[in-house]
Amino acid sequence: MQGRSTGIVYGGLKYQARCIADVRADTDQTCFLAGTLTLREENEIHLIRLSPASAGVGVELVCDGLFYHPSGEIWDLSSCPFNPRIFSVVFSSGETHGATIWQIPELYGQSNSPQLEELVSLDAHSSKIKRILWWPSGKHDKLISIDEENLILWSIDSSAKTAKVQSKESVGVMHYLSGGTWDPHDRNSVVAICDSSVQCWDLRTMKKTNSIEHAHIRDAEYNPNKQHILVTADDESGIHIWDLRMSKFPIRELPGHAHWTWAVRHNPEYDELILSAGTDSAVNLWLAPITCGDDPTSESLVDSPTRQVDPLLHSYSDYEDSVYGISWSSREPWMFASLSYDGRVVVESVKSYIPKK
């Protein structure tokens, strides 16, 4: 099912942008962070809140804070899962690349141009940093950073503003890392996206435990409710769902996008709903239920790809540029935000598509 967007539009971003993130730790209101990507102007981070409309009917997106980012273009943006004022940024400025943990000042609502507070800079990287991972399931004093060659586990103390490398491992000169995802069911397991494979790592030993070979992946995310299940966005257009206990073949395939599929996200509560974003200027909503028993070769799991006639529930196509950023709301899991490269933020509701229990 295709259609134009009926969502709520935020037009406050003046520059191109790729990154948007749900403020997961804010349990009082639905908020997102969005960061810009401009070479010539000072980059910005917008704190965007879903608010009752000023006219008293419906809702609107308002800017709860606009913060200047002094370090350069924003290539990765993640909100701390246990403190709504803390977030991480991966940035570049010319030939300089880095990552910083920032804190929003307490009095940001009383200033026209408040200064972000730098908590820590992650300076142990010798090659281009790609991604920062917070453990998604709650408070944890560890952080993972991924650059093109290394996986680094940090011990973070935000109150003392310190970051120490706990362990570091190289993936070897024949590989190139581009991202990863942290297992919400096991804080010792992380997936790293390589140029031609997906690698599973044990953080206790910093050794590879499993891999999906001959897989050219742009994005990946664990299922938040089912262990061992991973969804991946392929380098070209498709989407695959894997059981990491039987990783030779995917347990489900989705068509993806007309051009590159750039991002995939499981719904945090209704995990059979999957969002994908692509360079075909569309966001797709998929229904992909997985029955996952103790036996990974069970009939229900293997046969499931043939049982769903059309898994595409809706394609949101009211974009004029590639869509790189998507994020579900943790507080209202029937809402999601998308960000196209031209800086357009749209928040949509999928209430009508939520499977009845």
Image: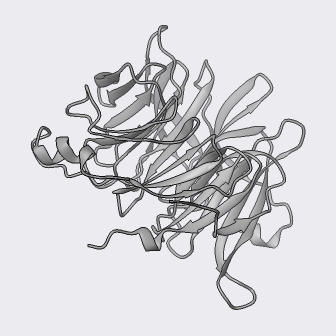
Image position of 312 (left or right of 244)? right
Residue 185: x and y in percent read 28, 48
Residue 347: x and y in percent read 62, 65
- Residue depicted at 56% across the width and 41% down the height: 162
Query: Which picture quadrant has residue 355?
Result: bottom left
Q: How is the image coloured?
A: one colour
Residue 30: x and y in percent read 57, 70
Tell me if residue 256 comes above or below residue 124 in the rendering: below
- Residue depicted at 57% across the width and 74% down the height: 29
Residue that extends furthest to the right in the rendered view of this protein: 40
Q: How many marks?
A: 0
Query: Which picture quadrant has residue 57?
Result: bottom right
Image position of 143 (left or right of 305)? right
- Residue depicted at 70% across the width and 54% down the height: 319
Residue 238: x and y in percent read 45, 36
- Which one is nearer the viewer's eye here, 55 or 181? 55
- Which one is nearer the viewer's eye here, 354 or 55? 354
Can residue 3 be seen? yes
